[in-house]
Image (tube, helix red, strand yellow):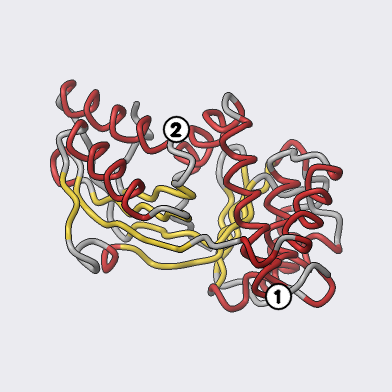
Amino acid sequence: MSGHSKFANIKHKKEKNDAAKGKIFTVIGREIAVAVKEGGPDPANNSKLRDVIAKAKANNMPNDTIDRGIKKAAGDANSVNYEVLTYEGYGPSGVAIIVDTLTDNKNRTAANVRSAFTKGNGNVGAQGSVSFMFDKKGQIIIDKEECEMDADELMMLALDAGAEDFAEEEDSFEVVTDPDDFSAVREALEAAGIPMMEADVTMIPQTWVELSDEEDIKKMNRLLDLLDVDDDVQAVYHNWDTDER
């Protein structure tokens, strides 16, 4: 099946995360806290928590750190008061950007996000100003080197579990699902022993923007770097085609 993977973007993001484990662990820690508050501390009865745990393992978070996060959230559920806020806007040359945040201080978060856009020669827009350019999908990335299953077998496993699309790239496989089917597909792959490098519900761009001006590239990187180091920022989605970078 034909794919639309921009695995270079995924790899770039993951390499940055590997260089800043503290940030990704903070991000996942907050997601664990929210999942426990919403559905309880038992993963068997909380599919959202199961998905966050899978994400934590894909990012090499130690099991004891995961367990501590769940216990802390369960014992301290009333004090977990994170608010989900999404910002949309444009970077240099009309690059569309969506920023998901989880915050206990929305004034601080709003100021930081606006500052990042301004310093990156972009601007924050109204809700819905760019999200129509993206499709919300479950996305699972599997490293070919770590996967022992044959590509056709893997594709059939994913499709039988409810996946919408399967793509084979140079160094990876990509499984795309409807957001509602993501948990079931991820759990089917997990049960089959498939190692997942990325497993998350994400926003996939419908079209991509190339940046050729060096100043635009510099500003875009500046914007992304500022968002990347902000603990309130959970995820950043954009349609900058970084494959040629």
Task: Identify residue type, mark 2.
Answer: Val
Which residue lies at the image location 73% right of the left edge and 55% below the top edge? 54
Q: Residues within 10 Å of mark 2 (few under 14, many from 20)?
A: few
Q: Is residue 240 above or below residue 3?
A: above
Q: What percent of the width, then of the height, locates residue 2?
A: 48, 60
Q: Please report the residue visible at 80 percent of the width from the left and 53 percent of the height from the top.
A: 194
SS for tag 1? helix
- Rendering coords of residue 176 (x, y %): 55, 64
User: Where residue 233 sits in the image (x, y, percent)?
Assistant: 44, 46
Q: Residue at x 34, y 57 (%)?
A: 205
Q: Secondary structure at mark 2?
A: loop
As drawn, is 238 to the left or to the right of 115?
Answer: right
How many numbered dots are placed on residues in this image? 2
Q: Which residue is mark 2?
A: 229
**What amino acid does circle 1 point to?**
Gly
On residue 39, which mark appears? 1
Residue 228 position by quadrant: top left
- Give above or below for 63 relative to 36: above
